[in-house]
Amino acid sequence: MGDQRTELYFVFMSFDPNYERLRADRSKEGMEALGAYLCKKHDRLLAKLLQPNTYKKKSSLAIVDGFSVEISKEQAAILGSAKEVRVVEKNQELA
């Protein structure tokens, strides 16, 4: 099934009006609600598209509605083809 080596990728989501609404609330409670919303949203997307125990989500990124995840190149292509996803980028470490 190809190269199953995993690497860190960043996944950036398509426009989401709920994200924009929640992000507008700068209170502590608003930021907590945004974080919880994004974590669930990103977890649901991964569970819908990828097999369990084949990926490791590292973090959700509230400032850009995205997340980081350790996945294979093939899994990155699957995520990149989802309508909810704007772009998938492999982490580029700078020397």
Image (spheres, grey):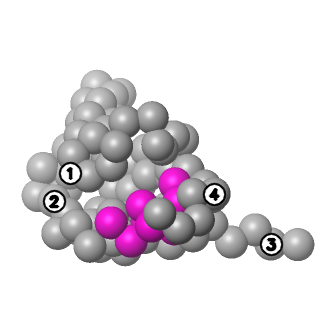
Badge 3 marks a residue whose secondary structure is loop
- In front: 76, or 12? 76
Q: Specify the quadrant that holds the C terminus.
A: bottom right
Query: Would you say 15 lies left or right of 3 here?
Result: left
| Cα–Cα gap, marks 4 and 1 | 32 Å
Q: Which residue is mark 3?
A: 94
Residue appearing at x 48%, y 44% in the figure: 55
Foreground tag (3 vs 2):
3
Q: Count residues near mark 4 (Cα–Cα under 10 Å), then give few for <14, some for 14-19, many for 20+.
A: few
Q: Which residue is mark 1?
A: 19
Q: Quadrant of residue 7?
A: bottom right
Query: Would you say 63 lies left or right of 50 here?
Result: right
Badge 1 marks a residue whose secondary structure is helix
Q: Count residues near mark 3 (Cα–Cα under 10 Å), then give few for <14, some for 14-19, many for 20+.
A: few
| Cα–Cα gap, marks 3 and 2 | 31 Å
Q: Which residue is mark 2?
A: 16
Q: Count residues near mark 2 (Cα–Cα under 10 Å), then give few for <14, some for 14-19, many for 20+.
A: few
| Cα–Cα gap, marks 3 and 4 | 20 Å
Residue appearing at x 53%, y 67% in the figure: 2
Q: Of callouts 4 and 2, which one flags the residue occurring earlier in the amino acid sequence?
A: 4
Residue appearing at x 33%, y 63% in the figure: 79
- In front: 58, or 3? 3
- Magenta stretch bounds: 71-78
Identify residue type, mark 1.
Answer: Tyr
Q: Position of residue 65 (x, y in %)?
A: 34, 56
Badge 2 marks a residue whose secondary structure is loop
Q: Which residue is mark 4?
A: 5
The answer to whether mark 4 and mark 2 are in CB contact below 8 A is no
Residue appearing at x 68%, y 72% in the figure: 92
